[in-house]
Each structure stands twice: as C-alpha cells, then as structure tokens.
Image (cartoon, helix red, strand yellow):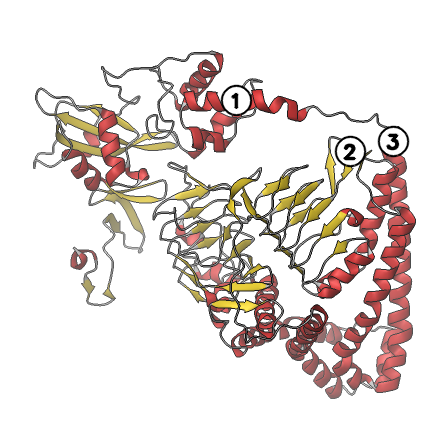
Amino acid sequence: MTAQKFPDHPKFGRIYRTGDLVNCDLEGNYFYHGRIDSQVKLRGYRIELEAIESTLAECHGVREAACRVQQEGAQQLLAAYIVAEAGHTPSFDDLKNALRRALPSYMVPGRFALIGELPKTVGGKLNRRELPTIEAPGQDEDKIIVPPRNGVEEKLAATIRQVLNLQNDISIEDDFFNDLGGDSLHSAILVSLLRDDAATQSVTVRDIYETRTVAALAERLQSGSETGAADFIEEVPARAPVSPVAATLMQIAWLAAGLIGGSVITYIAAFELMPLLIEAIGFISFILLSPILIFAGLVIYTPLSVIFAASIKKLLIGRYRPLRAPVWGSFYVRNWMVQKTVRIIPWPLLEGTVFQQMALRALGARIGRRVHIHRGVNLLQGGWDLLEIGDDVTIIQEAALRLIDLEGGQIVAGSISIGDGATLDIRAGLGGNTVMEPDSYLTALSSLSEGGRIPRGEKWDGIPAKKAGLAPQKPDLDPAERSYSQLQHGVMLVAARFLLGLVLLLPIELPTAVLAILYGLDSQSALNWINSPNLSGSFLLASALLVTLPVPLALAIEAFAVRAMGRVRPGVINRWGISYIRVWLKSWMVQSAGEALSGTLFWPIWLRMAGMKVGRDCEISTIIDVVPELIEIGPETFFADGIYLGGPRVHRGTVKLELTRLGSNTFLGNHAVIPLGQKLPDDVLIGVSTVADDTIIRPGTSWFGQPPFELPRREVIEVDRSLTHNPSTIRYSTGSSGSCSGLL
C-alpha cells in the first residue's frame, strides 16, 4: 500500500499519488475531474468511502453497502445506501452505533436509505453517480417516535425540523448531530432562531452540544428558568440627572490640558535639554550614549509620574469604595480622568517586577510579599483601594480583575480579595465583590461572577466558574537554587533588559554614528539643524535607510541572542531565581520580534532561528509567553491571533517548564490556550478561546469552549491552498499569506 501511494518518479524522486483525476493542456494548465479512487473530501477531512462501506458490510443484516457525498446547495453530507439481506432489515440506529465505535465521527453518514440493488457499470463496478439522492433521513418503521410533551419541547422540535429541512416527525430523544445530521452551522442557526422566543431565548451553542436531544435541552431550559429567576432581582438606586454633553466637554478639556502639558515638556526636552547635552558631550557621543541617557531619564521620570498620578487620584477620587453610579455622572468622569492620568506611568518598563507593585500600592492597592503579576495584566481601570492581594499570589498573563465595570448604564466599583497562595491562570477573570480564599485556583479562561467566592484550596473552572476539584499543589524546587528578594530580583531583571536593549540597538546606533562622521556632522551643525531643520532629499533618503535597513539586522541579532542564552530545559525553577530571568528575557524577545513579523511568512523562519521546531507550510500569528526551544509545531499548522502556546506555568513561587508539541494540520483559533506539556495529535481544531486538553482530544476532532466540548460536525469553507499553505512567489515576496482553509 505504501509503495502504491509513494512511487519513485524518474525526475522528481519519491512522490505522493493523491488519487485525483486531472489532465494537463498544452499551456500547462491542470483540470480536475474528480477522484480515481473512493476518497472524498468533506468538511476539510479526506474520507475513504470504502472504509465506511467495509464496516457497514460487516454489520448483521447488510448484504451490500455504498456511500457517496450528496449535494444540497451549499451543504454536503455523507449518505449511505444499504442492500439488506433477505428476511432481515437492519436498524439504521444499530448501523450508526457500529460506525461510531469503529470510525471517527466525521465518517458517520448523516443519512441512510434502503436500496434494492447497487447501480453498477458495464464492467460490474459500483457506479456511485447513479446512487439516488436521499431527501430526508431514513426512519425505521419500527422505531418509536417519542412526541413532545410540552410547549417548550414542541418549539424545539419544530425549530430543529425547520433548520434541518426535515419532513418527518422527530423524536425528542433523537441526537441532533448523530441522528439528525446537524453540524456547527446548523447549531448556530438553531440558537439564533430560538432566541426570538422568550421561552427559549437563554439557549446557547454549548447547550446544543451538551444536551443534544430535545428532551434534555428542554429540561435544561426549564430548570434554568426556575432556579435563575431570583438571581436577576436587584434593587438599583434612582439615578441622578446626568449630562453626556457636559461630561464630554470636561473630557475634552482634560485631554487638551494633557496635550498642552505634554507639548511643553517635549519642547523643553527637545529644544532646551538636548542641545545642552549635545554641546556638553559632542554629537557623536550623544548618539552612542542616547540609550543610557534615555534610561537615566526614565529612572528619574518613573517615580515622578507615579507621584503625580497618585496625587491626581487622591484629588479627584480620594479613596475608592464599592458603589454604583450613573454613566456620564460625576464619578464616571472623575474616574475617566484618573484612568488617563495613570497611563503616563511607563508600565511596560515595570511589568513583572516589584516596581509595578510599588506603583499600585501608591495608588491604593494592598499587595503582599512575593506576588507575581505577569505581563499583560491590566490594572489601570481604577478602583485600586478595593484590591487586596495576599502573599505568594500568582496572576498570570492577561488575567482580568474587574474592579471597575460598566453594567446597565451604570459604572460599578466592587472589591476583589485574593488570599495567600491563590492563582489566577491565563485570561481568568474576577468580577466585583469576589473573594478567592487562600490556596484557591481559577483556571485559564474561566470567570468568577460578581459576588462569587472560591473556598480555600479549591480549583474552579468554566464560565461561570464552578468547582472542578482541588487546586494543584506547589511543585518541589531544587533547594540548591538561590532565591533573591523581590527588590533584588526586580533590579536584576530591569538591568538585564537594559543591557540586552543596548545590544539590540547597535544596528541603529552604529550606522547613525558612521553617517554623522562621513558627513562631517558636529555639535554645532546638529544644533543648527535642530533650530532650523533642512529636509533635503539626501536627508530624507538617509533617514529612510536608517529606519528600514537596521530592522532585519536587529531581528537577526534578537534571534541569535535567544540562542546565545542557552537552552532552557524542562523542569521546575525558582520564580525568584536567576533562571527565571533568562526565561523571562527569552519570551520577551519572542514577543518583541513578533510585533514586527507576526502573521508574515518570515515569522516561522525567525522562530526556527531562535530554536523552535516549526514544520513546513505553517502560518503563525501572535504567540504569547513562548520559550522557543520548548515548542514543536507540526507541518501545515495554522494559528489565528493571540495564541497562548506552552508558556511557563508560574504558581506560588515556582515556574514549571515542559515541552509542548502540536501535530500536523492543526488549527488554533483566536486566544486559544495550549497549556505547557500538551501533546496534541494531528488534524485537530481548537476553537476561539478554548483550552486544549490532550487527555480527551483525538486525531481528526474539533473542540470549542471553556471547558471544551467536541464538535461532532462542523461546516468548513474550502479555500485555494495558494492563498494559505502554498502561496505563490508573488504572495511570498510580500511576506504574508491569507487566512486558513477551515474556519469554525
């Protein structure tokens, strides 16, 4: 079989026999005429019809079987034709169950029909083109149809028949996917129609996948309406009169004041301080020392900006307290002003260090010792006096602490308390007035609703979050690794970033200094240009070259720097040790390079240069918190934007590192989370905002949601591979390709 599929070609060597029937004209154009064998492509999957037919032929009561893909406008589905043995008619349900046990779900036909004999060609082979179209799912004569028992079930059954274009009655016990042939597109349409009725407006796509039958879905809807009605009863205080126009005018005035103040400071720096420095140290020295001068300026500016922001917050707000206030009212506008003011603090410089926590404490937050707040955590919305964080707390990438929220035309301020040793995983969210007791754990992409509480030592998961077991224990650390204080570690991390930044800026600094020397520029000519700029053609050309040419060199140096720092080995390291600084710097450089290359065809090349194993024909967009040598990506894999890929797991002062591997032909939707250590099989789809779990994911399956559930059938849009995995030379030269060939 292998030799037949991979023959040796006299010119091209080992090639793959696809089974496609094509001809080539004199101009070299190829024309596709279908398949030579019984392989078809449906919803993105290559399916061997003979595999289905042979499985059916082994079932009791089946003499012969045939399958084909039948068209229904834009819809396609598998249809099975059964020639029954004399005196015995097989049950279609039994046949489906047998196929599900032996084959992947996408190979189970959606429609069955009995046929007297299979159409044959003159040569005696099966003629699939003559197989009739099955208009509706076959139905056993002896099958018991359980009718709807109430109004909700009648509504659900009627809507399902409408969506699937079914003529026969359906049983309330029929599976929407396996028995009725529904898929992801049908489920989305079904939810849209059901939301037009008050009795079924709360239904979600997850409900369709988890319940599957009319009976189970109706039971969930009815139980939800009975238990959830009281939760929405809330006494809202009367709103004071507000004026959006007055609020907008105050906002404009605040922005104007900030613009004027910023312009004055910029003018002084550019036209007063910079000329003094150039005159004092010389123009060439100024160019070479500019990174050090900028860093020194930031060291002075940062504490001043924190003091200024804290003073404005105290002047306009005082102390935050739990409250509800109208949008466009006084509190809304004052909080907006404070939000804009705190953005003058250089937060990217402080991220991941104790200095970030010092700034938050100055704004009113109560933060304990040895707290880890990862890059990307947004704490700039206000409400800092309502935030209490205990010792050894871990807040991972882009976790959301909703101290300030908008709800029903009101701005809501609520407290958040995170106990000692608690952990918020990637993009986990806490609503207002929530409590995480000590050693509790909120998993990735999960959300704890307003007023919720996670008991001590428990792990909660889902949206909304529910108990999912006990929180993971703290991994054992190597006692030989030295642990530094937060202040020492913060100073070392900032210093390491600064020194690395000096190296990465060399491709810009050195050419600038060389050009200045070649053109004979000195302090006086530089000062004359500052006072009277001359934008000549040669100057604009030199500026354009200085801006563009050093970028590829800087990116190459960045990839080399990642390699030069040595391989990171799987294991457990100390969050407050030297090893974590190396891990932090590597992931930071990947993020920095991604800002220039993410989504282009050059991005996989850079990742390979940095030490990552990336298969051929991959399209990779933004990846977050990645250590390159700990990631392996199979061929023909597609990443949407914002993928959390095998990042180090920080938990209670420890950092766990493991190898993460993706199989071939994998699709990852926006903000999908692939936890470290995952080994995903081939042909897998992980949907938008879904956490991968290799303990349940099988080859050829699709998953969506948090917690994830399987999509047994989904709609797939086919796109020319020259727009995705195999771009033309022209598209390749632009550095970008199109979107993926299969969208959820």
Left or right relative to 715: residue 268: right
Q: Is residue 549 visible?
A: no
Residue at 47%, 66% (x, y): give it: 630
Q: Secondary structure at mark 3?
A: loop
Question: Which mark's residue is nearer the viewer, 1 or 3?
Answer: 1
Q: Which mark is residue 331?
A: none
Disc number at residue 410? 2
Residue 12 x %, y %:
25, 66
Crowd class of label 3 (few under 14; some 14 to 19; many from 20; radius 10 Å)? few
Q: Distance of mark 2 from mark 1, alpha carbons?
A: 30 Å
Which residue appears at 52% of the width and 47% of the height? 470
Decide: is 659 above or below 176: below
Going by the numbered disc 3, the residue's amino acid type is: Val
Q: Nearer the viewer, residue 495 or 45?
A: 495
Which of disc 1 and disc 2 is earlier in sequence?
1
Residue 35 drawn above or below residue 678: above
What percent of the width, then of the height, locates residue 103?
A: 26, 41
Residue ID for mark 1:
223
Which is in the foreground here, disc 2 or disc 3? 2
Horizontal side, residue 741 vs residue 308: left or right: left
Q: Residue at x 67, y 51 (%)?
A: 419
Q: CA distance from mark 2 to mark 3?
A: 11 Å
Mark 2 lies on a secondary structure that is: strand
- Name the foreground residue: 326 vs 117: 326
Please say whether residue 431 is visible from this viewpoint.
yes
Three-letter residue code for mark 1? Ser
Give the total of numbered labels.
3
Mark 1 closeness class: few <14, some 14–19, many ≥20 residues within 10 Å: few
From the image, tell me which residue sits under label 3: 242
- Of callouts 2 and 3, which one flags the residue occurring earlier in the amino acid sequence? 3
- Nearer-the-camera pick, 475 or 413: 475
What residue sits 35% from the left and 17% below the top? 170
